[in-house]
Amino acid sequence: MQTSFTAEQLADPKLADANTTLRKCVHCGFCTATCPTYVLLGDELDSPRGRIYLIKEMLEQGKAADASTVKHIDRCLSCLSCMTTCPSGVNYMHLIDQARAHVEKTYNRTLGDRFMRWLLDFVMTRPTVFRLSLAGAALARPLAPVLQAFGLKRMSAMLSLAPATLPRPLPDRLQPAKLKRRVGLLKGCVQSVMDPGINDATVRLLNRFGIEVIESTVPCCGSLSHHMGKEDAALAHARAMIDAFAALDVEAIVITASGCGTTIKDYGHMLQHDAQYAEKAARVAGKALDVTEFLAKLELPTGTAQGRVSYHSACSMQHGQRIKTLPQALLRRAGFTVSDVPDGHLCCGSAGTYNMLQPEIATRLRDKKISDILTTAPEIIATGNIGCMTQLATVSPVPLVHTVELLDWAYGGPRPDKLNHPLA
Ligand code: SF4
Ligand code: SF4
């Protein structure tokens, strides 16, 4: 794609990066076929190629974003399915991240929109505040249909996603003494409140194979803020996380939420122009592994677990981190019978805060995903991202669990409680 940035613009390293990315796009349009919003809405401007044009125009002009451009950028899920399909290696993730930051800085959103975005960013990235808010939302949940009827669809979506009850925070974990190896583990903001049992299962499983686990003292990696274009907040979270992990003597940083994994693995890029953090950020990013990547290195023994599992691959797992078959292979090795989901490349509509900011598109994607999953007749649905678990649990008749909970169970841990009581 031809670009026409001025020499002065190209002196800005971020615009120079965008220019390099834009120039890789050859307009072939292969990405449109696998883009969930294009598949649903059929509008070129809601396809990756259309959005790339809009972003190019917006950045070249160097002006405030306009309403039409913002509408199509906001509708993007950041699912990165387009990156998997693109034959030219266009890094759409970096482009859309930059576009969202530009929109956030230059576009004057309505008061309601600004409030909603501020609320989500403030609440969800702070576990204590989030826990209190969810308790309130659970009480107000019966009002969701009323809010929907009055056209307050986003508020209604927020309430509908709040679980009726929350798991209690877990007591401090006691780990066996004298373990030979040591890893760091991301605590997580949303996941540590919604489902602390996921990291608990991870610690039990890794301990059993001789590995000590140190959970991060900092909860949030900045991913949620990053996806809303709140660059300063995202980088502040990232720097705090980098400081916390850089101080640990660990062989790897294990992550159990694939959305967070995609962001932490990108810290090197996010902070490449920060002289103080660039090297540390790249070092932390280089140690980051999804829990299934780390487990695959351990060469776990063959197990005797039973059960028909449908594996839903989160977009951040398959497109963001390019982990396509490892989780399924681990589950099969443990003994489970595993099916992949038809049209598995399409997003379930969760996408960070997307299911609350774009509830109509998110609901259509969720309904398609659950019906695709059910064609495989599963007894259990497994996935590797808390966002997908929460999104799908609102309509799933089949329990959803994290992959690592099934592996912990298969290798001597307790049966996941959610198999008796689904998340919703
Ligand atoms: S990230 Fe997903 S929704 Fe956005 S343009 Fe790419 S494929 Fe479409
Ligand atoms: S597939 Fe890649 S090169 Fe082709 S239009 Fe999409 S982003 Fe551009």
Image (cartoon, helix red, strand yellow):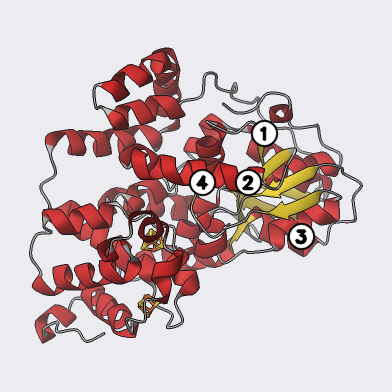
Question: Would you identify the image quadrant in which residue 317 lies?
Answer: bottom right
Looking at the image, residue 356 sits to the left or right of residue 80; the answer is left
Quarter of the N terminus within the rendering: bottom left
Q: Nearer the viewer, residue 153 or 205?
A: 153
Label 3, label 2: how far apart the Cα atoms are? 18 Å
Residue, disc 3: 329
Along the horizontal axis of the image, is 123 left or right of 346?
A: left
Q: Name the N-terminal-most of marks 1 and 3.
A: 3
Q: State the CA–CA distance, disc 4 to disc 3.
A: 25 Å
Which mark is on residue 58?
none
Q: Nearer the viewer, mark 1 or mark 4?
A: 4
Q: Is residue 84 left or right of residue 396?
A: left
Q: Between marks 2 and 4, how big is the CA–CA gap?
A: 9 Å
Cβ atoms at labels 1 and 2 below 8 Å apart? yes
Q: Are marks 1 and 4 in contact (CB under 8 Å)?
A: no
Q: Amino acid at mark 4?
A: Lys
Q: Which residue is mark 2?
A: 373
Q: Earlier in the sequence, mark 2 or mark 4?
A: 4
Whole-angstrom CA distance, mark 1 to mark 3, is: 21 Å
Query: What numbered label is drawn on residue 398?
Result: 1
Identify the mark nearer the N-term, 4 or 3.
Answer: 3
Q: Crowding near pointer 2: few (<14 within 10 Å), some, many (20+)?
A: many
Q: Could you tell me the amino acid type at mark 2?
A: Ile
Image quarter of residue 137: top left
